[in-house]
Amino acid sequence: MAKDQKKQLRPKAETPKGFRDYFGADVTERKQMLDRIAEIYHRHGFDPLETSAVETVEALGKFLPDVDRPNAGVFAWQEAEVPGGGAGDWLALRYDLTAPLARVAAQFRNDLPAPYRRYAMGPVWRNEKPGPGRFRQFYQCDADTVGSASVAADAEICAMLAAALEHAGIQRGDYLIRINNRKVLNGILDAMGVAEGKPADDVLRTIDKFDKVGEAGVRQLLTVGRKDESGAMIEGVGLRPEQADPVIAFLTSKGADNAATLMNLRAAVGGSETGAEGVEELAQIADMLAAMGVGEDRAVIDPSIVRGLGYYTGPVFEAELTFEILDEKGRKRQFGSVAGGGRYDGLVERFTGQKVPATGVSIGVDRLLAALRAKGLMGGTDPGPVIVTVMDRDRMGEYQAMAAELRTAGIRAEVYLGNPKNFGNQLKYADKRSAPVAIIQGGDEAARGVVQVKDLILGARIAAEASHEEWKAQPAQTEVARADIVAEVRRILG
């Protein structure tokens, strides 16, 4: 080999920007949480669905191949040329779980029951600039009803969401599902004389800032603009003051209870038929939630909810966690939204040319898991397996038999498979694995038909707290008959 031959460059061992790896407890706890949510969805008659991670860009809908590389917001690539000439399809990783559902509902419309109720859980990918807490791959957990125009489907989704949050571990009083209707918003736009398109979008974005800037701030943003906290001027929408009045009436229509809110909303929409229809749908949802035992302490009509996605056509809802946590600077703040959804009656129509009503909700898996950890309901050390140490290589079969007995009894266990020469390294390995117990059997113990069972958790506590004499007495290590290994491990774990 020539001396001047270049060294082969090794790839960097690093996670791509905007992505992350999940280990041990992260995976286990997420699965536990999703299993609890799935149990509620299954109980409500929803079936699981797993769709392909890859869709055609055309099917995704938002991102059309009108540029050389139509990957704005998605990870997209073009297939090789098709036989006989011509460009191949543009494909992309799914950016949510709703667009694939629309494709499935259209593709299998003759085979699926109508309405079709499904839930889906899995990773999605977005080609966006990553930032703190913002990743390019994340988990979603959706439930949708496709093929029902009844607001009973919307009410059911809200009730099911409340049950799912509680079954996952969020207690009543720590969350609130807030419900609005895009038809009411459209009625307000009618009353303002604002047409669809950019003016309407600007108004909706301004309404969404009500929680942050309040009534006066929204009025300024709708008209002449306002200064932010830094003193910079934010341009206003440019409406006349009287045009802003219906928006303010709408945003301040939240009453002491649903009945008062609905009465105020009816006044706010004025003579708009669309707005009146939206208010009536909210009234029906409120009645049905009450009939299902979901009180206003769990779900409430709230005009301030504005879902950002343009395909919502009717009721919209958002689940907010109301308890306080400490941020990275030690300041108290509310946890905020962990789920959202609504009615989207136009999505499947892209494929079929016919109106197909649909409604659904999406839970932010990572945010809900973070909330459960913030409440101390998850996030403890994931218990590792019982470690069967190896004192004699020639007796590996017997050590494997011990581990097999423990597994048969439902106890997580493994045999140490590293170099057994240094017993201290075996215990260090057990510590890294968060093992609660170690099984030890050398030649002397084997001849006498016994094993040493070491309680590693108690041992660590004794080492930290006990006197030297107590530590030497080894109360954390017990000798038992080989036949009693399962019973002793169960005793310690109990």
Image: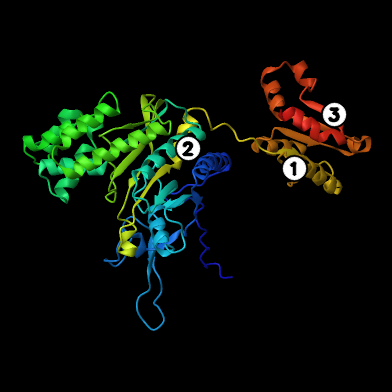
Quadrant holding the N terminus? bottom right
Please indicate whether residue 319 sits to the left or right of residue 163 in the image. left
Mark 2: give few (<14), some (14-19) or many (20+) Cα within 10 Å: many
Q: How is the image coloured?
A: rainbow
Mark 1 lies on residue:
407
Q: Which of 156 and 403 is in front in this view?
A: 156
Q: Report the disc number at residue 175.
A: none
Q: What residue type is labelled 2?
A: Ala
Q: In which quarter of the image is residue 204?
A: top left
Is the Cβ of the residue at disc 1 closer than 8 Å to that at disc 3?
Answer: no
Disc nearer the start of the sequence (2/3): 2
SS at badge 1: helix
**Percent x, y for residue 479?**
85, 29
Under tag 2, what secondary structure? helix
Front position among marks 1 and 3:
1
**C-alpha distance separating marks 1 and 3:** 21 Å
Residue in view at x 19 percent, y 46 percent: 201
Amino acid of disc 1: Arg
Give the residue pinned by disc 3: 479
**Pointer 2 with pointer 3, Cβ within 8 A:** no
| Residue visible at 76% across and 17% down in the picture | 470
Disc 2 to disc 1: CB gap under 8 Å: no
In the image, is 178 to the left or to the right of 208? right
* Residue 218 appears anywhere in the view: no
- Whole-percent x, y for residue 271 in the image: 13, 40
